[in-house]
Amino acid sequence: MLNTLIGRLYIFSIFIVAPFYTLIYLNFDYSRSIVQDELLHTARLVSNQAVENQERLVESTQLFLSSLASSSQIQSPDSEACRQFVSSITPLFGRYVNIGVPNKEGILTCNGTLLDSPVYVNDRDYIKEALSTNRFTTSGLHIDRATGLPAINFAYPVQAYAYSNQVVGAAVAVVSLEWWSKLLSDSPLPEGSVAYILNSDGVVNVSFPSHIRYEEPQSFGTIVSSQDGVKRVFTQQQVVGANNEVLLSFVIGVAVDEPLLRVNKRYTAAVAVFSFLVIATLLLIRWFFIRSITNPLKKLSLLAERLGRNEESIAPEPSIGVKEMCALQGSFIDMAKRKATAEQRIISQSQIDTLTGIANRDAFLLSLEKIIEENQGQHRISVVLIDLDDFKDINSRGHEIGDYVLKTVASRLIHQVPSARLFSRLGSDEFIFILEGEDASKSRTLSVCEKVKNVISQPILSEHGDIELTASMGGSFYPDDGESVKTILSAVDQAIYLAKQQVRNTISFFSEELKSAQSEKMELVKDLRNAIANKELYLVYQPILSVRGEVIKFEALIRWQHPKKGLIAPDRFIGLAEEFGQIREIGLWVIQEAKRALRSIQKVHGDNVQVSVNVSPAQLSKYQSENDYLLEELITECHGKSEEASPNKLIVEITEHLLMNSDESTRKALLSFRDEGIQVALDDFGTGYSSLAYIMNYEIDYLKIDKSFVQKLGAESASETLCETIISMAHTLGVKVIAEGVETREQADLLLAYGCDYLQGFYFSKPLTLYNALSYKAVKIS
């Protein structure tokens, strides 16, 4: 720009204008300092005046009380003459709200205002001191007992005529602080100023205005911000007594917002006017320069170029003095403007995210593809995908809030993470960026990701309250994890998936192990879809025995016999079924299969035998939206709702974690089970943090002690104590207890000694096929 005439003109203008702006700023700063000093001086004058008023009041009161103490009418404080005399003089002295003369025992009957009964005031230190030390004393700031108002009381000993050293009472004057409020009202303090009177203990007794709440100033003599949002300068003056003790303190806070705002407005207006004049002058100079010098040169150059190349060039200005050429050039200028506007609009709409104003998915993919083509594996590139955790919960408050959060996050990322390139919004709550060169190392990428986490975790202020966010991130590297846009993004998707499956607010990077695990997982999910149709799933049944060795119940447990992978444990595929929406179909099949087996089991082991089935949290959370299918399937044919009907023969087993984290649908489902007489067993008890209130509210029928505690019986005294406590607690609540995982005779004997109701474990039997369950024989336990 410096090599052009107009560029040099601009630089020259800046050098001329800059000193004037500097002078304006220095003058502005000086004016603010002057205003602050004047306000501080005002506050100190008012404080000093208050202190002087108070000291004069003390001196005049001492003279008044000494004169009053010598009056013959008050030599007998308990007399009617004293009461009449004091009552008659009290209205004559407007500065005193009350005058009284307690006797030497500190009992006040002689008072300027009418008393319902004698008042005992000898517990007041200043009266006790006046009676005992025979000198003038003051109370400091306190609430007067006779008037109930904030005041300062003074006492002077009253001596008998005959015995000059004999104290018969004390003359007391109560001084109101109304003069202080009038002083502040008449003072030239700005609006919003506050004042307080503190007693000797630093406790506020009087505030001005009266409704204001006292805030201890952070400092004196400097501007501080109060909790009400007003900035003030505070001063403090103290009134001391004869022994240099602090009687009271005056604290005044002068509001500085309005005076400083006037200064700000004055200089803002000055800067605005000056800036307007500068801009207007520059525009006039520019217009003159371009019209008189630059345009003619450009027009001649463009015309020469057009003629030399035989093409129609576009002149920046339509006027060169030839009418026909002006019309032709004007047409081309108009077309060029329209074309440029249309192209810019198309590019903006196709590559800019309309909500956040940053690049969208298409723009990112095009840019990444171009970078990879130009790179040709010469240097490393890292790609990081950001997924806002639980963003749907924020959107549930309203899409306006969700949009505001997305815009705020985008703005923060752009401005606070400058090392990242191509920040783009990839989807609803997803953002993506790249790092290149040295920044694309794994350590630097991880460092940038941590910075992104910190930026996102900063609370977002809104009218609905602070919004706190976390984000999960997944990253991949070019060319290590792929050499094309498609493979790189696929690797990023797998990494972010891993991050979301782990603890939220975490970072994961793509690896070959992740690729292999993801591939195996998706293959397992695919096979699980056909497991029921191919009859690969089956149930086994583990007996649950009573203390007498009778088979009372069976627990139905699911197994998957994969044709190629063999037997697959439930903990490997149940979580996948919940994640990919297959748990409803599998759970329904388990219930139906258990009901079919129940008929055969009852024929062999009796009609009272029950079968328990495990119910997933996902099944209960969908309970209300699935037309009560779960409740209908759980009810067995021989069960009725009458009081005489036997319990439902299918028992629902839920985990302790499900009970603690239940949503509204889950709570309604459990309550419906209770209403229909379907018994509920709480599995894995002791591994979570269940409250007894949950057990009572949902009327849990059985507690199943987790096998991790049962298997330590005999080896750890803590497990013995815990099991005994659980059993005792459950019985107190009317809940039966099942101990699972019993593997030895010693464990069984200890549980029986503790009063356990039912036992289950390998000591009695492993889970059995239906055929073997029908032939299972009860064993003698005790």
Image: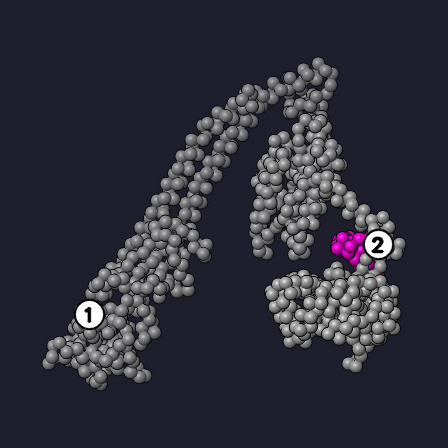
Q: Nearer the viewer, residue 85 or 591?
A: 591
Inter-mark Cα distance, 1 to 2: 102 Å
| Secondary structure under the numbered disc 1 in the rendered image | loop
Q: How is the image coloured?
A: one colour
- Is 579 covered by the magenta stretch? yes
Q: Residue furthest top?
A: 308
Q: How crowded is the residue under tag 2: few (<14 C-alpha within 10 Å), some, or many (20+)?
A: some
Q: Nearer the viewer, residue 650 or 48?
A: 650
User: Magenta segment, which residues?
Assistant: 567-589
Dot 1 amino acid type:
Phe
Question: How many marks do you count on the picture?
Answer: 2
Percent position of residue 23, x then y: 40, 34
Give the quadrant of the N terminus.
top right
Dot 2 amino acid type:
Gln
Q: Which residue is depicted at the point 58% across and 23% down? A: 291
Q: Nearer the viewer, residue 533 or 728?
A: 728
Question: For residue 452, which quarter of the picture?
Answer: top right
Q: Nearer the viewer, residue 201 or 208?
A: 201
| Foreground tag (1 vs 2) | 2
| Secondary structure under the numbered disc 2 in the rendered image | strand
| Residue 651: image tag | none
Percent position of residue 481, x then y: 72, 35
Q: Residue furthest bottom?
A: 80
Give the quadrant of the C terminus.
bottom right
Percent position of residue 608, x then y: 81, 75
Percent position of residue 262, x then y: 42, 47
Question: For residue 510, which quarter of the picture?
Answer: top right
Q: Which residue is depicted at the point 65% across and 62% down? A: 712
Q: Is there any visible trace of residue 333 in the rendered image?
A: no
Note whether 368 is above or below 188 in the view shown.
Answer: above
| Residue 136: image tag | 1
| Residue 561: image tag | 2
